[in-house]
Every structure is written in structure tokens, then in C-alpha cells.
Image (cartoon, grey):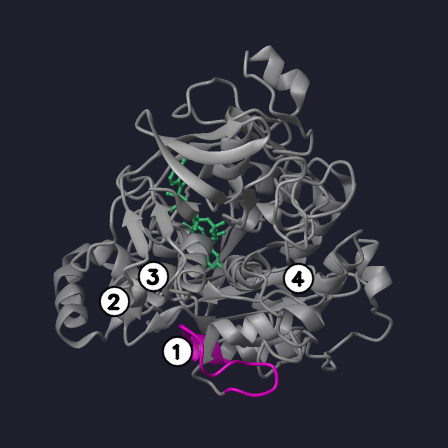
């Protein structure tokens, strides 16, 4: 049977598209997901506080590593990516950030992207969400992604919100609403104590549709072409025919699959003996990401959530979560944070903060038994650019990932500023009661050179690789912004984090889902949602042109 749409990757964007494209019963849709199903019993996926467990585990994670990063002491940076139904939304931190409205003005300033400005994207952000904190002109109230706002009730959150104001930064009602700049409680993809992944929100509710088929453990090896028309995909050596192939494998897998199938830089493909279908040298270029560090403090009062993380408590926490969907198992701990500008040259916030009432690394390691608190911080607009390149014709060999973190003056400058702003906030009087001293990086790291050296040794990825098949109309762009079709070939589209022209200034799951929602209308030829031309906060002097010149 020939499917109308074969979606490669049942991840974040893939699940949203599967729902929207199969809404018309006459359309036959197949989703091919390389990973396993997101079983209902799988607490590692569904219990929010278990978020560290899938990382590094082959049953959930593609387990990528960068090439040695030249400006980070040649460290290979570990990159988790979801390899399970729901993709990265089944293993991510559940933090929900749209990015700044000026991010989309910046997108729209690129050739061909006029209809990706904030006014055109906002209706899709609204369509996808049910914001439990309240729907309004900026927030949706009827979408599949139910968003709970972090309770942020610990006295340490109280101290944090006071400290940011003492340091001269504003509070804001909603970082996803009219004003992103400032500090606030954060929205999370958690509903009734469970992770609400894209698979749970978009795919499972419609799996009963007779025109929608899902195959898990179906690893797509290649796109099959007749001339320059994609006519299907290869899975386990067999061809699955399709009128349209839609790549939703994410920012690493989508460019990899294009290159393996002959769409990419012809010289590089020739060198590997891959027959060239179409010379498109932007494929795999323009890789962007966010790097982050943990600035940690010891806490002099027993108010952090450290005790809840002790190993012997896990069975009790698990049981409380299993039977009541409550307790420490029901939170991702990322309940609040904010966005600031670290210097006056930037038009809108270039730093994102997450505050946690515990000192712990993302992989779950923490200073043994002690109470602590921390911020995660990093620059959001690094101008460093990297690449994803296949090194083998074997689809199971991971491509080479080069990020070039810390390779530019702007990036290094903003890193020093990021650590200084974090320290400024955490050393305000509001924290006096709790401040037991900085434990990481610690007072010995002081000069700009020391800060940069520590960042190079300690920083981790914030797990936002993107932009490797960017939309646009110029020679190096890969995807047509008005159809999501890959330039120069037929029957092939890309819809996932790889199509961003620039990474937005926060976590990127919400932007991926917005892209998928908007792409569904573009693919189906539906009349797009009416643009919503609402006023949004601009720091005095900030404008799209300045944003675009970042
Ligand atoms: C550990 C972690 C924590 C994160 N935390 C946050 C957070 O808190 N908030 C936030 O906003 N963002 C977060 N992110 C980032 C965010 O979740 C991702 O950027 C986003 O979900 C990517 O969506 P996507 O659709 O592009 O790709 P994915 O959701 O990764 O989906 C790609 C899917 O394609 C499948 N696939 C790939 N190749 C093939 C193939 N050849 N054949 C078949 N299937 C294939 C994969 O298995 C996967 O299911 C995090 C990411 C990770 C990994």
C-alpha cells in the first residue's frame, strides 16, 4: 500500500503532525519510529522526577557524542536524544518556553520567512496549548499540550524572586506571554503528576483512527528516490512506498538521513561514495545549540529538596507517585527562572536562568547529602555555528557532530557575563539566611580567564541542537518556508528542530511543536490561522532590526 504521508520519527514534531495530518479520514498516514513504545508502565518516562534515568540508557537515548571540541579542552560533549515513542519529549526536562517574540521577528527578517514572524506564529503557539494558569490573548486554552505552572513554593524560591529584584531585574507574570524579560514561575509539560509528552498529548488520543498507522522499532535507513522524487523509505531492507516522506527525526537524524540518501554537499557525498540525488550544501550546516553550567551554593538551612533525592527514599517516592501522582516524584524541579539581558548591546534577553532548590547536576549527581541550591545559566545567542556530517554509508554509524562551542568572541564575552550575573543574583541579601558559600565553580574561579576555563571544563549542552536543515530562500537553505519541502527534490519535507533558522532564546520543545502545528496547515493546504498582531514587550531601543543583527 502507498501511504499519503510517511512520517520518519514518532518524536515531538512527528506526533503532532501525525495527529493533524490524519484528521482527514481519507488521508493514509504511517509513523515510523526507531525506538520502542512509551509503555504506560514505564515510570522512567512518565514520572517527572525520573528525568535523569533515561539519559545514557540505550533503550531511550541515541547516545551521541560530539567530536572533540577545540575550545573546550577537546572534550567530547555528550548529547542525549530521545529514541522512544515521543522522541525527546519523552525524556526531556519538561520545561516549556516559547522563546522571545523578537526571535520570530528575527526569523522573519530572513529571505522567504515573512510569515514566520511572531504575529503568524502566535496563533499556532496558542492552538497547541491549554495553559492552566489562564488563557488570554497570548495563551491558549484548548490545545492538547496541558501546561501546569511550577508551584515554586520552597522558601528558596521566595529568596530567589526577592534576590533578582535586589539585583535590579524585573519579575514578569508569564515568560510565555506578553513579557518574557524578567523572572517568573515556569510552565511545564506535566499534567496530573505525569509527564505529558507529545506522544501522550497528540498521538495516543488518535491512535484508533483507521487511517493512522504506527510502527515502533522501525529504523529508517534511507529515503528511496526515483530521479529527484522521493517515493518511499527503506526499513530493514524493505521499501515502504509513500506519496510524501516527511522527515521528523530531529536536528541530528534528519540531515543524516538526507545525506545518506544523496541530498547534501555533493563533494562530501562523492567522497563517501554516496550517489548524489541533489547537491544541497546547506544540509547539516548551521548547527546551533545552547551550553549551560550549574552555579551551585551550599544552603545553611535544611530547606532544600536534597533529602527527597536520597536513594533509600526512592521506593517511598515511587509509591507515592504511583498511587497518588503526588510528592517529589511528580515534579521536574524546574519550577521557576527567568530571562535577562547581560549587556546593553543586546535587544532582548540573551541569558536564561533556571533556579533549583537543590544542588544537583542533570545526570542526578550532587554533592553528597548536603543542602544546596543552584541556577542553570548560559548564553542563548551564541554565534558559534557547527555541523552534522555523515562519515559512513552505514545509517547506524552516528554522524560527526561539531558544535564549536566557545569559538567566538561574542560567545566568550557572554559566558563571562552569564556567570557574573548568576553570582550577582545569588549573593543578594535575600539569600543571606541560606548562603553557605559557592560550591561550584567556587571562589577560586574569579578572573575572566578562570571563568572561561571553568566553563570549558564544566559546561554541558542544554540539549537544544537545531537549525541543520534551516528554512529559507537563499542558496544554503534546505527547506522552503512556505511548504516545508526540501529544495530541489519532490515528495520530501522536513518538520522538526532542524528547520529553525536560528535557535530561539530558551528551551526549544515549544518552538518545535509550534513549527509542527504550522507545518501541518502548510502541508494540508489549509488556510493558515489569522496572524495575531499583538503588542509585546520590547526593552526600550529593542527592535527587530537590532534583533536581526545579533
Ligand atoms: C534529555 C533532554 C532534555 C531536554 N529538556 C528540554 C526541556 O526541558 N524543555 C525543552 O523545551 N526542550 C528540552 N529538550 C529539547 C527538546 O526536547 C527537543 O529539542 C525536541 O523535543 C526535539 O523535537 P524533534 O521533533 O526535533 O525531535 P525528537 O523529539 O528527538 O524526535 C525525533 C524522533 O525521530 C526518531 N528517529 C530518528 N531517526 C530515525 C530513523 N532513522 N528512523 C525512525 N525514527 C527515527 C527518534 O527516535 C525520535 O523519536 C531536551 C532534550 C533532551 C534530549
Q: Which residue is mark 2?
A: 329
Q: Quadrant of residue 334?
A: bottom left
Decide if residue 359 is in sight here.
Answer: no
Q: Nearer the viewer, mark 2 or mark 3?
A: 3
Checking the image for residue 203, the label placed there is 3
Magenta segment boundaries in residue numbering: 135-158
Viewer-proximal residue, 358 or 74?
74
| Residue 394 counted in the magenta span | no
Above-or-below relation of 300 to 53 = below
65 and 105: which is toward the camera? 105
- Mark nearest the camera among 3 and 1 is 3
Residue 361, horizontal then vertical, whole percent: 40, 51
Mark 4 surroundings within 10 Å by alpha-carbon count, few (fewer than 14), some (14 through 19), many (20 or more): many
Q: Give the residue pinned by disc 1.
A: 154
Q: Which residue is mark 4?
A: 421
In primary-sequence order, the first of circles 4 and 3 is: 3
Distance in Å between CA atoms under marks 3 and 1: 35 Å
Amino acid at each position: 500500500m502507498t501511504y499519503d504521508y510517511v512520517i520518519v520519527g514518532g518524536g515531538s514534531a512527528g506526533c503532532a503532525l501525525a495527529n493533524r495530518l490524519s484528521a482527514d479520514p481519507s488521508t493514509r498516514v504511517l509513523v515510523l519510529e526507531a525506538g520502542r513504545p512509551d509503555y504506560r508502565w514505564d515510570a522512567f518516562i512518565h514520572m517527572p522526577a525520573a528525568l535523569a534515568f533515561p539519559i545514557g540508557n540505550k533503550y531511550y537515548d541515541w547516545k551521541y557524542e560530539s567530536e572533540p571540541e577545540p575550545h573546550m579542552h577537546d572534550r567530547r560533549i555528550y548529547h542525549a536524544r530521545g529514541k522512544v515513542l515521543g522522541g525527546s519529549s519523552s525524556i526531556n526536562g519538561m520545561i516549556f518556553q516559547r522563546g522571545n517574540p523578537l526571535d520570530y521577528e528575527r526569523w522573519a527578517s530572513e529571505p522567504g520567512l515573512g510569515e514566520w514572524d511572531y504575529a503568524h506564529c502566535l496563533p499556532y503557539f496558542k492552538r497547541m496549548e491549554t495553559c492552566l494558569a489562564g488563557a488570554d490573548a497570548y495563551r491558549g486554552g484548548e490545545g492538547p499540550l496541558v501546561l501546569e505552572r511550577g508551584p515554586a513554593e520552597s522558601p528558596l524560591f521566595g529568596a530567589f524572586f526577592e534576590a533578582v529584584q535586589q539585583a535590579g531585574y524585573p519579575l514578569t507574570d508569564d515568560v510565555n506571554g506578553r513579557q518574557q524579560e524578567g523572572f517568573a514561575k515556569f510552565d511545564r509539560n506535566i499534567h496530573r503528576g505525569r509527564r505529558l509528552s507529545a506522544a501522550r498529548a497528540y498521538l495516543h488520543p488518535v491512535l484508533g483512527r483507521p487511517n493512522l498507522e504506527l510502527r515502533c522499532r522501525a529504523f529508517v535507513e534511507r529515503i528511496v528516490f526515483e530521479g529527484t522524487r522521493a517515493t518511499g523509505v527503506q526499513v530493514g531492507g524493505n521499501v515502504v512506498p509513500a506519496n510524501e516522506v516527511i522527515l521528523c527525526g530531529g536536528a541530528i537524524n534528519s540531515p543524516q538521513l538526507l545525506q545518506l540518501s544523496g541530498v547534501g554537499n555533493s563533494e562530501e557525498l562523492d567522497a563517501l561514495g554516496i550517489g548524489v540525488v541533489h547537491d544541497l550544501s546547506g544540509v547539516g550546516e548551521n548547527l546551533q545549540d545552547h551550553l549551560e553550567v550549574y552555579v551551585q551554593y551550599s544552603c545553611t538551612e535544611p530547606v532544600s529538596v536534597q533529602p527527597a533525592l536520597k536513594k533509600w527514599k526512592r521506593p517511598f517516592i515511587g509509591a507515592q507517585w504511583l498511587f497518588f501522582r503526588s510528592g517529589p516524584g511528580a515534579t521536574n524541579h524546574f519550577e521557576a527562572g527567568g530571562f535577562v539581558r547581560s549587556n546593553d548591546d543586546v535587544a532582548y534577553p540573551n541569558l536564561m536562568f533556571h533556579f533549583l532548590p537543590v544542588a544537583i547536576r542533570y545526570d542526578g549527581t550532587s554533592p553528597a547529602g548536603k543542602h544546596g541550591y543552584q541556577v542553570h545559566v548560559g548564553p542563548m545567542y551564541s554565534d558559534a555555528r557547527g555541523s552534522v556530517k555523515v562519515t559512513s554509508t552505514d545509517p547506524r554509524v552516528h554522524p560527526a557532530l561539531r558544535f564549536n562551542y566557545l569559538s567566538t568572541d561574542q560567545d566568550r564575552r557572554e559566558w563571562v557575563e552569564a556567570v557574573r550575573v548568576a553570582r550577582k543574583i545569588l549573593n543578594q541579601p535575600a539569600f543571606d539566611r541560606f548562603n553557605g558559600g559557592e560550591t561550584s565553580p567556587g571562589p577560586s574561579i574569579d578572573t575572566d580567564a578562570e571563568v572561561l576555563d571553568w566553563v570549558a571544563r564544566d559546561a554541558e549542552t542544554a540539549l537544544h541542537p537545531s537549525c541543520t536543515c534551516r528554512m529559507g530562500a537563499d542558496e544554503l537553505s534546505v527547506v522552503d518556508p512556505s511548504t516545508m519541502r526540501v529544495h530541489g527534490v519532490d515528495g520530501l519535507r522536513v518538520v522538526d528542530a532542524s528547520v529553525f533558522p536560528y535557535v530561539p532564546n530558551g528551551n526549544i520543545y515549544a518552538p518545535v511543536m509550534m513549527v509542527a502545528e504550522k507545518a501541518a496547515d502548510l502541508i494540508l493546504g489549509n488556510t493558515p490561522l489569522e496572524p495575531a498582531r499583538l503588542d509585546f514587550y520590547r526593552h526600550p531601543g529593542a527592535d527587530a532590526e537590532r534583533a536581526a543583527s545579533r
